[in-house]
Amino acid sequence: MEQYLNAPVKEVITKFPKVGKILEEYEIGCVPCNVGSCLLKDVVEIHNLADEEEKEMMARISRVIYPGQEVEIPRTERQGKVRSKELTYSPPMKRLVDEHVLIKKWIALIPQVLEIFDVHSEDDRKIIIEGVNFIRSYADRLHHGKEEDILFKYFDETSDIFKTMLDDHVEGRSHAKATLEALEKRDRQGVVDHLMAYRALLTEHIKKEDEILFPWMDRSLSVKQVGELFSKFNAADDRADQDGIERCEKFVLEIEKKFRKEESK
């Protein structure tokens, strides 16, 4: 069993599709993940199921992998309390979750923006430019900056789960850059493709953080570390361009208001 516990979860699911279905029954959504490089043992640990739930799940998985055999299942390490069905966050983690709210508003609006987008219209081009500025200034520099420069430093950044999250950040930057390049070339389809790809990426990324990674981090951090994070996040926010943040917030709220008016006509 050690062989598969130390294998990327996507490889295990590909070889044994029933494993993916079992994980989903325990609200472990690895099947739709586009990366799946996290080790199976890390996936089990980070979800921190109750003892009996984990024992039952691993027994079912072992029967799929080794049908008709008795297999000894290694116990995963525990980090803090067993997860609660109700998601709660420490104050610094709650701040990141709150920042996700504005990011989710923008990516939810992207399909509506693109549906009427005219690559030759200066007004429409300005919306795309402002949208990419939001991605770079708010979602990346402010939000991802706190994750990369502060939060992730409290953990092993070489582990697969963190490499996956960091790869998502890099891919998001790539889509932002490619969107502006396509806009410069008057390539409407390129703008559409890269903004929609960014939307899909961030939708999954935020879901993983809000529902899995951040609660696991909270369970793993000491009270002292949570206090340190709170202070460091405050300092990072104080250093940030407040006018720029206000422009980003105003941009999203104005676009949201515009399409709400369109829908009411």
Image (spheres, rainbow, N blue to C red):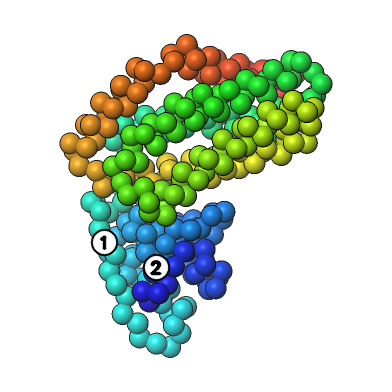
Give the side of residue 83 with respect to residue 240, left or right.
Answer: left
The answer to whether residue 256 is seen in the rendering is no
**Residue 264 at x, y = what percent?**
70, 20
Q: Residue at x 30, y 21 (%)?
A: 235
Residue 122 drawn at (x, y percent) = 76, 15
Q: Earlier in the sequence, mark 2 or mark 1?
A: 2
Amino acid type, residue under disc 2 in the picture: Asn
Query: Which quadrant does the N terminus fall into?
Result: bottom left
Q: Residue at x 54, y 27 (%)?
A: 136
**The residue tagged with tag 2: helix, strand or loop?**
loop
Up the image or down, 224 lies above or below 80; here it is: above
Q: Nearer the viewer, residue 56 or 255?
A: 255
Residue 121 in view: yes
**Residue occupying image coordinates x 50% and y 29%:** 139
The image quarter containing residue 229 is top left
Label 2 environment density (alpha carbons within 10 Å; few <14, some 14–19, many ≥20): some
Q: Position of residue 18 (x, y in %)?
A: 52, 71
Along the line of sight, which residue is nearer the eye, 265 or 58? Answer: 58
Q: Residue furthest left?
A: 224
Residue 219 located left or right of residue 136: left
Residue placed under numbered mark 2 in the picture: 6
Q: Position of residue 7 (x, y in %)?
A: 44, 68
Q: CA separation, marks 2 and 1?
A: 14 Å
**Which amino acid type is shown beneath numbered disc 1?**
Glu
Q: Secondary structure at mark 1?
A: loop
Q: Which residue is mark 1?
A: 77
Q: Nearer the viewer, mark 2 or mark 1?
A: 2
Quadrant the C terminus occupies: top right
Q: Residue at x 29, y 35 (%)?
A: 90
Which residue is outermost to the bottom? 68
Tell me: residue 122, above or below residue 28. Answer: above
